Image (cartoon, rainbow, N blue to C red):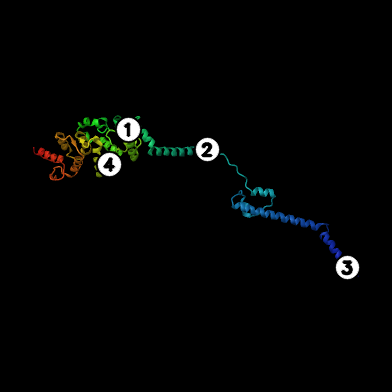
Amino acid sequence: MRDEEGRSLGLGSANEEGEMGGSGVPGGGSSALSRDFQLNSHLSTLANIHKIYHTLNKLNLTEDVGQDDHQTGSLRSCSSSDCFSKVMPPRKKRRPASGDDLSAKKSRHDSMYRKYDSTRIKTEEEAFSNKRCLEWFYEYAGTDDVVGPEGMEKFCEDIGVEPENKCLTSPSSINTWLFQPFVTTNSAVVVMLVLAWKLDAQNMGYFTLQEWLKGMTSLQCDTTEKLRNTLDYLRSLLNDSTNFKLIYRYAFDFAREKDQRSLDINTAKCMLGLLLGKIWPLFPVFHQFLEQSKYKVINKDQWCNVLEFSRTINLDLSNYDEDGAWPVLLDEFVEWYKDKQMS
């Protein structure tokens, strides 16, 4: 009985102590558990904040913190709002550029635009333009589709061929030009012949629209200035033996009247002077021979053989073969020249 009462009493005391929480205060156990839960929750929140802070710090999104905090590595207790305000960086507003910055940027932009614009304009000016070439053509053609003798004379003046030396501007001007003995050395005149060859002009003193566009396009010239800058190139073509022969042959058909198969002797002397006057030492003597001869015209075979003669026969005519296939014109010239040398 006593043991049972004792055990009963002991059990009752234990239960009462459990209810009292061991401290003698009613409900003390529940309060302690609540405090432990809150503390654990707070520590868990701080740990999460600490992880977020280090993550943001790796991404360079946090503000600099005090050197002491990095050294100690301690996590100071703070309220949730305080910690979040330190962890999250403030949103930075874009500051408007100052007046000086705006001026500098505008100046750089204007400079770049001017450089681009000047380059674009220069490129457009250097590039060949069909429209500009047409406008240039009609400066000399007027309302026609061909540049005639009057327009040709102005054209020659613009590119630097003196008006008094313009034997290629019209057939009628050749005879007057012929009587200026040393004008054959004028390279500004012979360049007109080379230009006509490049344009493949069919009639002396005339450039058609089609000839103009085709030739000037091949030369990439659409202004007077560009053509003037091309004259040296045109003259240089005469230094090539193949080109010279082509130009020489072209000159015969270019200068003759289209209803004639031969070249008038005066026209022939003019053209020979242009082409051979500077390069064939015997040309002055040959010119004298033609003047005193009975020949009124020169055919194409005679014309072509004069060039071959000038290239292959010695100045003293020592290698000339009278039994060769030379035309009679040249046989007579050799005989005339030898008689002249003996007298």
What is the C-alpha distance between the residues marked 1 and 3? 145 Å
- The amino acid type of the residue labelled 2 equals Leu
Left of 104 or right of it: where is 158?
left
Task: Name the residue furthest left.
Answer: 343
Left of 204 or right of it: where is 64?
right
**Residue 156: which quarter of the image?**
top left
Q: Mark 4 points at which residue?
A: 237
**Residue 307: which quarter of the image?**
top left
Tell me the SS state at disc 2. Answer: helix
Tag 4 or tag 2, which sits nearer the N-term?
Answer: 2
Which callout, 3 or 2, points to the residue nearer the camera?
A: 2
Tell me the SS state at disc 3. Answer: helix
Identify which residue, 253 or 196, lies in the foreground: 253
Tell me the SS state at disc 1. Answer: strand
Which callout, 4 or 1, points to the residue nearer the camera?
A: 1
- The amino acid type of the residue labelled 3 equals Gly
Task: Identify the disc placed on residue 146.
Answer: 1
Seen at 62% across and 53% down, the residue is 55
Q: Name the residue under label 2.
A: 102
What is the C-alpha distance between the residues marked 2 and 4? 57 Å
- The amino acid type of the residue labelled 4 equals Leu
